[in-house]
Image (tube, rainbow, N blue to C red):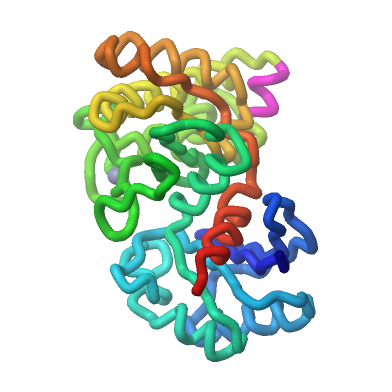
């Protein structure tokens, strides 16, 4: 089968690459997402695809945020106001001259991990991506679970710290507000550490800096609390943690698993294994390509 083009529209960067049926990524390119208008963004994406001169017959696009029921536009993402409600799929089909499938990024990541990574063989697979924000998708019996707005819902916004900091969603003490990249970095700085971003905090935690280790461990605990709530509702048999925060490995996963077990019902926690995702930054991109396979 011919490879497809996969596009991952993230909050800051849009990645595109060729994705083959084995989930391999080739010819990675990226463009900045931020644009004055959606039309300008589509034009830059068209240029990038055309320059790459890939021989593909369809394109899978994963976008950060909720999509509408017709899967032709971004319904909600407060970080990409200029792209909301714009007929993205049709505009891309017209400009590229190829069929385009539009999917929610967390669904794409869950699909990719289920097919090629940490979710293989799972019947109820929950995949959480913890990076700038916290999102999640779920595969049930090999199908993307679409509960609201074509996805699982805003699972990164379960409350883990009642009365905690105000979240970008408007809530208080959401998991995202506690384990998002900026929150972790800020806590590390408040403890006297110095790091420009999450990656640097993780580096220092790995090197044994106590303050950085605590910042990651705290994130692990809050993530574990989020899993306790989600686990009791969704009963996943496997939970994979993806995204930039998961680069901390066991420094994050050990307190996460412990808190999950301490707080969830034993029935739920005994049946769920918490693992690190395997595809790293490629997951959403590969998933976008995999979604395009289903294109008529
Ligand atoms: Zn929130």
Q: Nearer the viewer, residue 200 or 246?
A: 246
In this image, 234 relative to 98: left or right? left
Q: Residue at x 63, y 35 (%)?
A: 278
> Can residue 134 be seen?
no
Residue furthest out toward the left: 163
Decide whether the magenta segment is chiefly helix, strand or loop.
helix
Q: Nearer the viewer, residue 108 or 57?
A: 57
> Can residue 90 be seen?
yes
Ligand 1 occupies quarter: top left
Task: State whether residue 95 is above or below residue 142.
Answer: below
Residue 32, percent across and down?
62, 68
Q: Residue at x 52, y 32 (%)?
A: 121
Q: Residue at x 57, y 64 (%)?
A: 293
- Reply yes or no: does residue 203 show up in magenta: yes
Q: How many marks?
A: 0
Which region of the structure is painted magenta?
A: 202-207
Quarter of the image with the N terminus in it: bottom right
Residue 77, percent across and down?
36, 62
In this image, 125 relative to 264: left or right? right
Residue 83, percent across and down?
42, 75
Q: Residue at x 73, y 55 (%)?
A: 25
């Amino acid at each position: 089968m011919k490879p497809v083009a996969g596009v991952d529209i993230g909050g800051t960067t849009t990645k595109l690459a060729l994705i083959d049926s084995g989930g391999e990524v080739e010819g990675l390119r990226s463009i900045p997402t931020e644009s004055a208008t959606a039309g300008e963004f589509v034009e830059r994406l068209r240029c990038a695809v055309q320059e790459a001169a890939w021989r593909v017959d369809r394109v899978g696009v994963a976008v950060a945020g909720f999509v509408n029921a017709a899967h032709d536009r971004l319904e909600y993402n407060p970080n990409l106001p200029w792209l909301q409600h714009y007929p993205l799929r049709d505009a891309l089909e017209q400009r590229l001259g190829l069929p385009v499938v539009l999917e929610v990024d967390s669904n794409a990541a869950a699909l990719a991990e289920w097919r090629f990574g940490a979710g293989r063989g799972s019947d109820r697979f929950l995949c959480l991506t913890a990076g700038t924000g916290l999102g999640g998708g779920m595969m049930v019996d090999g199908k993307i679970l679409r509960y609201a707005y074509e996805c699982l819902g805003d699972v990164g916004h379960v409350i883990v710290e009642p009365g905690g900091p105000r979240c970008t969603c408007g809530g208080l003490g959401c998991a995202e507000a506690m384990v998002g990249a900026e929150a972790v970095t800020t806590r590390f700085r408040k403890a006297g550490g110095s790091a420009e971003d999450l990656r640097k905090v993780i580096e220092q935690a790995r090197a044994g800096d106590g303050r950085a280790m605590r910042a990651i461990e705290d994130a692990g605990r809050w993530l574990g609390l989020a899993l306790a709530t989600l686990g009791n509702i969704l009963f996943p048999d496997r939970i994979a943690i993806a995204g930039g925060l998961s680069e901390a490995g066991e420094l994050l996963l050990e307190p996460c698993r412990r808190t999950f077990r301490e707080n969830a019902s034993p029935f739920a926690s005994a049946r769920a294994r918490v693992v690190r995702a395997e595809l790293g930054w490629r997951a959403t991109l590969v998933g976008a390509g995999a979604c395009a396979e289903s294109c008529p």
